[in-house]
Amino acid sequence: MIFVHCWLGDDRTGVFFATYRMVFDHWTPQHAIDEMDHFHFKKFWHPAMKKYVLNFPAHFAKSPAFAELRKQQEFAAQR
């Protein structure tokens, strides 16, 4: 379990951990958003952040920035 104290960036931090949950814990975007909502994510003020989380799996699958991480996950899955 990870606890983060971040008052001014709490919504950005929530997005970061939502993406972490999707990549490493294999959560769906909706599951990650549900957790963000549980911790009072201000989706009314940050619709772009919610959209980013919803679109993150496609971004992760295609972006060259995540190529090495995808390779590591594929290697681990083969073991």
Image: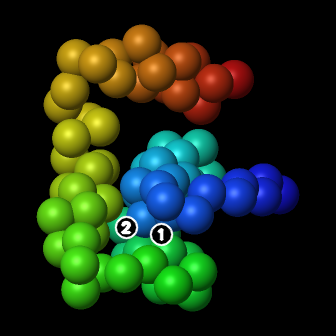
Disc 2 residue type (three-letter): Pro
> CB under 8 Å between callouts 1 and 2?
yes
- The location of residue 79, given as percent across then percent down, is 69, 23
| Rendered-image quadrant of the N terminus | bottom right
Q: Secondary structure at mark 1?
A: helix
Per the image, the residue denoted by label 1 is 32
Q: Nearer the viewer, residue 15 or 6?
A: 6
Q: Is residue 53 positioned above or below 65 on the image?
A: below
Residue 32 against residue 57 in the figure, above or below: below
Quick one: SS at disc 2?
Answer: helix
Asked whether residue 47 appears in the rendered view, the answer is yes
Please state the horizontal and vertical placement of residue 49, each as a whole percent of the image: 26, 62
Q: Is residue 70 above or below residue 12?
A: above
Q: Say whether residue 34 is visible.
A: no
Q: CA distance from mark 1 to mark 2?
A: 5 Å
Residue positioned most to the front: 8
Q: Which residue lies at the image location 18% right of the left edge and 31% below the top edge?
A: 62
Identify which residue, 39 or 71, lies in the foreground.
Answer: 39
Q: Give the answer, above or below, for where 78 lies relative to 17.
A: above
- Residue 43 left/right relative to 25: left
Residue 70, quarter of the rendered image: top left
Percent x, y of residue 46: 24, 71
Observer-nearest residue: 11 or 29?
Answer: 11
Is residue 30 left or right of 36 when viewed as pictured? left
Left or right, 62 with reference to 36: left
Question: Hey, what amino acid is under mark 1?
Answer: Ala
Counting from the top left corner in percent of width and height, residue 3 is at 78, 58
10 Å neighbourhood of mark 2: few (<14), some, or many (≥20)?
many
The residue that mark 2 highlights is: 29
